[in-house]
Amino acid sequence: MKPAPLIGVISIGVALLLTLPVEAKSMEFVSTDTPPYWSSKLPENGFGGSILHLISAAADVTYAIKYLPVKRYSTSVAPFIVGDPDLLTNQKDRAIFPIGVFYSAFFFYRPHHEVIKVHSMKDMKGHTLGVLRGSIEDKAEFVRQGVKVEENDSVESLLKKLKKGRIDFCILVAGSGRYMIQQLFPDEQESFSQEIIPALTRPITIMIDMHDTEGRMIAQRYRQVLSKTLHSKNYQSIMEGFYDKDYIPVNRNAKLDKFIKYYANTWTEKK
């Protein structure tokens, strides 16, 4: 029998190569431990982790998550990061894929204050505001407006001070505040109230360094599956599990779509 022509062998080899599945890429995301959104102690690393898992499975991407303290996270130059882009001080060229949204809120302890209506900084005058350290850019402006600002290093510390009356109210990510109240004061949850701050709605995102060769390939994979995954039944199931079916914010999808449109220009490599 004559050996197969070399060109035929090459053609068969190329055809076989094209039909084989592309090998899944593996990398490490950097995050902060901020339950219920991101935490190694929660199933699938929390709410954000569940969405990341869903989208990564659709994109055939395998990964791990490394948790850093907030300060180290904010200065990280890692090629793969999850969270809020505004928390990063190094605004390098990253593809940013919004996969969810989170809301910030004023929290109050009802036995001290039913609620403090805040429409401007003037409404805060004479009160003590608790915030996470480094979360406000111009502390001096609050002081000039007659607002005392007390910075703390944890949500837990802020909520304990709120109950003790050492602060009048605090600004927290709504989900994080509710989660920690459940952990710290399970029998007093009704004693805490919150008021959502619409202007502080922010995205939960996947961020990928577009100067990284592997990063550009991974970004393309996420781009291809993003829309379909965010509109899937599995994604909706994650939402319902987190918010409870009847309490998903009515403007959530519109907010997410707005962030997707805003960051879409980051998905391709800059020339």
Image (spheres, helix red, strand yellow):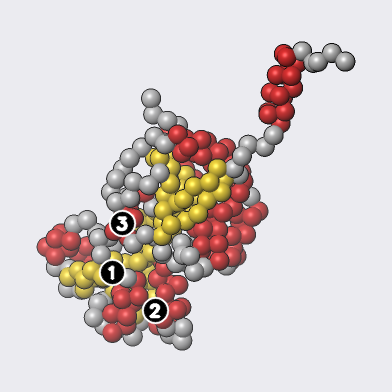
**Residues packed near mark 2 inside 10 Å, few (<14), some (14 to 19) or many (20 plus):** many
Give the vertical position of 3 relative to 127 (above or below). Answer: above
**Mark toward the start of the polypeptide (2 vs 1):** 1
Mark 2 vs mark 1, foreground winner is 1
Residue type at tag 1 = Asp
Q: CA distance from mark 3 to mark 1?
A: 14 Å
* Viewport quadrant of the N terminus: top right
Residue type at tag 3 = Arg
Residue 243 visible in the shown view: no
Residue 33 visible in the shown view: yes
Q: Which residue is mark 1?
A: 153
**Residues packed near mark 3 inside 10 Å, few (<14), some (14 to 19) or many (20 plus):** some
Identify the residue shown where x is 23% and y is 80%.
Answer: 166
**Mark toward the start of the polypeptide (3 vs 1):** 3
Secondary structure at badge 3 equals helix
Q: CA distance from mark 3 to mark 2?
A: 31 Å
- Numbered mark located on residue 192 in the image: 2
Residue type at tag 2 = Phe
- Numbered mark located on residue 72 in the image: 3
